[in-house]
Amino acid sequence: MRLSAKIEYACKAVIELALHYQHHRPVQLNDISKRQYIPKQFLVQIMIRLKNSGLVNSVRGIAGGYLLLKAPSQISLADVFRAVDDNILAVKGNVKSSKAQTLINSIWNDLNSQLIQKLEGLTFDTLVAKIKNESVTYYI
């Protein structure tokens, strides 16, 4: 499975906000863009989606930027995936199915359920802790 740049950038943006969550100050778009190597024009669109889904809030003005609306422990990777691309975790079945298609759909549903469960269990406080401890390897 290959993740889209949209999802990758959204996860990196939320990680950046989670790294600064305890400061209670907005993180400017330019800072997120530079620190996480995300093109600014792409980041603007991602932040709008994250805001619309209730994960971040924006603050206007010179000292403005973006803040997480929830604690990093309350935001999962699944939340970010759904905010950016609500179809990525959906399984679509054909109306007309052969036995082979039914079997394939069943396997995909099972795999998808396991993936969702894993993504829901990975919260941004855990990811930030891994980054701070420089233990960025992850095993499934």
Image (spheres, rainbow, N blue to C red):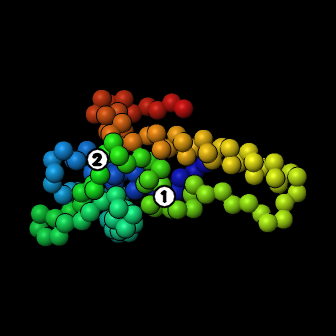
Q: Report the residue at 28% width, 47% height from top.
A: 71
Amino acid on which the number 1 mark rests in the picture:
Arg
Q: Is residue 8 visible?
A: no
User: Disc 2 marks which residue?
Assistant: 71
Q: Is residue 43 above or below residue 2?
A: below
Q: Residue furthest right?
A: 99
For badge 2, the amino acid type reads Ala
Identity of the residue drawn at 20% across and 63% down: 65
Q: How far across and how far down the image is residue 131, in percent?
A: 32, 36
Q: Mark number for residue 82?
A: 1
Question: Label 1: how many residues lie within 10 Å, few (<14), some (14-19) or many (20+)?
Answer: some
Please state if 6 lies on the left or on the right of 103 as rendered: left
**Could you tell whether 44 is left or right of 22 in the image?**
right
Residue 136 or 123: which is nearer the viewer?
A: 123
- Residue 87 lies left or right of residue 130; in this view the side is right
| Contact (Cβ within 8 Å) of mark 2 with mark 1 | no
x and y percent of residue 111 in the render? 66, 43
Residue in the image at 43% along x and 54% along y: 80
In this rendering, the count of numbered labels is: 2
Graded by Cα atoms within 10 Å as few (under 14), some (14 to 19) or many (20 or more), the crowding at tag 2 reads some
CA distance separating discs 2 and 1:
18 Å
Q: Is residue 76 visible?
A: yes
Image quarter where the C terminus lies is: top right
Specify which label sits upstream in the sequence, 2 or 1: 2
Q: Position of residue 61 (x, y in %)?
A: 13, 70
